[in-house]
Image: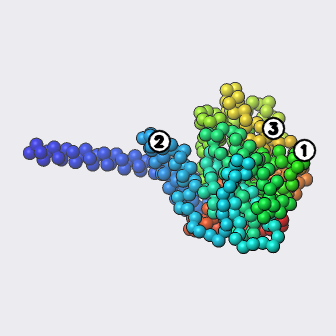
Amino acid sequence: MEMIFGNELWMLIFYFCISVLFLILGWFLYSNFTRIHTPPGIIQGIKLRLIYFSICILEKLGVILEKLGICSKLAVRRFLMDGVFPPGPCDLSIEETLFDTVPVRIYQSKTPSPEKRRGLVWIHGGGGIFGSFKSHERLCRFFAQESATVVIAIGYPLAPEHPYPAQQRSCYMAISYFLKHAGDFGVDPQRIVLGGDSIGGSFMVAASQQLVLRQDLPQVRAHVLVYPFLQAVDFNLPSYQQNQRVPFLVKTDVGHFGKIYVTGNSSGVDALMQNAHIPEKLRIKYQKWISAEHIPEEFKGRGYVPFVPGRFSEALFKEYAAAFEARCSPLLMKDAVLRRFPETFLLTCEYDILRDDGLLYKKRLGDNGMSFTWHHLEDGFHGILSLVGFGPLEFPGTRRGLKTIIQFLERY
């Protein structure tokens, strides 16, 4: 009788523990599924929710693995961004080398060309702490296959292991080397385009501020900016409010990733997201370039309200001082530098938290009489182009957006 009772007791404990685990799992699933938002304007929004939901589950696994001392949650996130399923073989020549100590991967057609080809230097996104050759392999292959272009992907070092501004320095070094030696790689030095997505676009603009001052290098023919991160001054522009819960880049991630990228830690994120890092004097100074007042009225719907900054933090201001450098926030560069830039292609997405960075840059280009092409994906979201080559995980806007870039490249 004692044996039977003992077994039943253990079974009750077992079922109780299983029930608690399911309750915890159910709470986690519900909280993560409801904390994101996919507006009706996103085509196949349910698919986007499911993809992001799966990522959240795996990231939670990363937290557990970190607590067990197996690996860091940062390593898990990097693994996810690099892509669980590597791309298959292709008919391109792909090789890795160093440009002035900086790793690069070169993509080009195996078919010989009677003349030197166009060159495209691509700088991947990932907040400065994620991303690699692997994460943007499909995107670089697409550009090389669809536009008869030699594509150079830059493998810059990641923060926090390599503190800011190591990323910008590495990109500048690699681009400078390529401009000087383009002919060695079958590229016409007069047909080189620089491009980047998300923070990769920021690194490209940061490098370009130095490149335009060089007299010993060929001038770049054009820029390609894809949903770029261009300022760390105002985290409450209309797009930050409207798209704060839209995958793949939600507002809490912008704060955590940005703080780690610039300072090496994620403390004080909540205050940062309330714009508590900028004193009123600087806020007024930068309003001519970064302000909701410059966002067209048609982009101020969907619940936007004028924002009142949080209480200013002197400590946060000092810690996050790099945010007010033009290499970290390219929208703060001087007009005289911007006017020396080549023609620009700019792609923005309606449901991207960084949409207004692009709109503010578009205004700067227009105000300075610069030549540019703007394409706005009405159903787009952050990271949509990086899904090219993922088959059923692609979205209708993926190929449409890429097609506009290819058309722009073919001008050069």
Q: Residue 232: x percent and y percent?
A: 72, 41
List the residue tagged with mark 1. Answer: 336
Q: Quadrant of the C terminus?
A: bottom right
Q: In screen coordinates, is 240 left or right of 30?
A: right
Q: Residues within 10 Å of mark 3 (few under 14, many from 20)?
A: some
3 or 1: tag closer to the N-terminus: 3
Q: In screen coordinates, is 380 left or right of 85?
A: right
List the residue tagged with mark 2. Answer: 66
- Quadrant of residue 94 in the image? bottom right
Q: Residue at x 77, y 31 (%)?
A: 280
Q: Amino acid at mark 1?
A: Ala
Quote the CA–CA distance across marks 1 and 2.
48 Å
Q: Residue at x 57, y 67 (%)?
A: 88
Badge 1 element? helix
Q: Quadrant of the N terminus?
A: top left
Q: Amino acid at mark 3?
A: Tyr
Q: Residue 285: x percent and y percent?
A: 82, 35
Badge 2 element? helix
Q: Is residue 63 visible?
A: no
Q: Is residue 99 visible?
A: yes
Q: Residue 52: x percent and y percent?
A: 54, 55
Q: Amino acid at mark 2?
A: Glu
In terms of depth relative to the viewer, which is nearer, 165 or 273? 165
Foreground disc of the pair 1, 2: 2
Q: Residue at x 43, y 47 (%)?
A: 27
- Quadrant of residue 150 in the image? bottom right
List the residue tagged with mark 3. Answer: 286
1 or 2: tag closer to the N-terminus: 2
> Do labels 2 and 3 touch, CB within 8 Å?
no
Badge 3 element? helix
Q: Residues within 10 Å of mark 2 (few under 14, many from 20)?
A: some
